Amino acid sequence: MKNVEELKKILETEADLASALLAEVMHEQEAIIKLHGQDVSATVSAQQELLKPLENLETERMQCIQSIGVELQNQSLGKSPSVKDIVKVLPATDGEQIAAAAEQLRSVVERIVSANGRNKVLLDRSRRFVDETLRIVTEDHTRKIIDQRM
């Protein structure tokens, strides 16, 4: 089936892009820890660039799954089948390959979510540190930091 091969390629490409995204998220984490603001900005831009093709691939994947459902003419798939639903009705070898590609993608996405959670904690703590430092320096924000007499 042409659509099954296409689905495999889409899932593999998504997994590759997600791995690249994970690498950028990890670089962002290093930049946050090392207090390199420009590197954080650069990694965020790189992440946004990687998300665009991932969005397109996600749309293609959903269309491909719909096409496979129509090809198989299987009513048990319903209107919006998932990869798991497709794997159940495909021949064993195709189903296993698609399941493996989907699992690889799922694994990378879980690692991205975990790393993003850690990055959020790091950024929140950094923000809190800056706020607390400013509060101390300005004596509870009652004193100005910049002398405006110049």
Image (spheres, grey):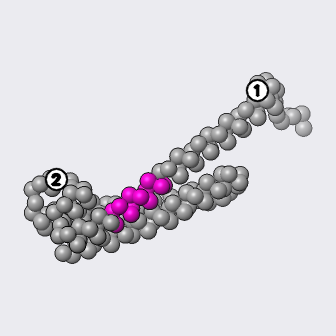
Quarter placement of the N terminus: bottom left
Q: Could you tell me which residue is drawn at 20 percent across and 69 percent down?
A: 92
The spot of residue 133 in percent (x, y) is 76, 34
Which is closer to the viewer, label 1 or label 2? Answer: 2
Residue 75 visible here: yes
Q: Circle 2 — which element?
A: loop
Q: Could you tell me which residue is drawn at 71 percent across and 51 percent down?
A: 35
The residue tagged 1 is: 141
The spot of residue 73 in percent (x, y) is 9, 63
Is there a contact, CB below 8 Å, between mark 1 and mark 2? Answer: no
Q: Which residues are magenta?
A: 101-112
Q: Quadrant of residue 6?
A: bottom left
Determine which of the numbered discs, if any, sits on residue 79 in the image: 2
How far separated are the C-alphas under marks 1 and 2?
A: 58 Å
Q: Count the marks: how many?
A: 2
In the image, what residue type sits under mark 1? His
The spot of residue 14 in percent (x, y) is 39, 65
How many other residues sit within 10 Å of disc 2, few (<14), some (14-19) or many (≥20)? few
Residue 104 falls within the magenta-colored stretch? yes
18 sits left or right of 76 in the view: right
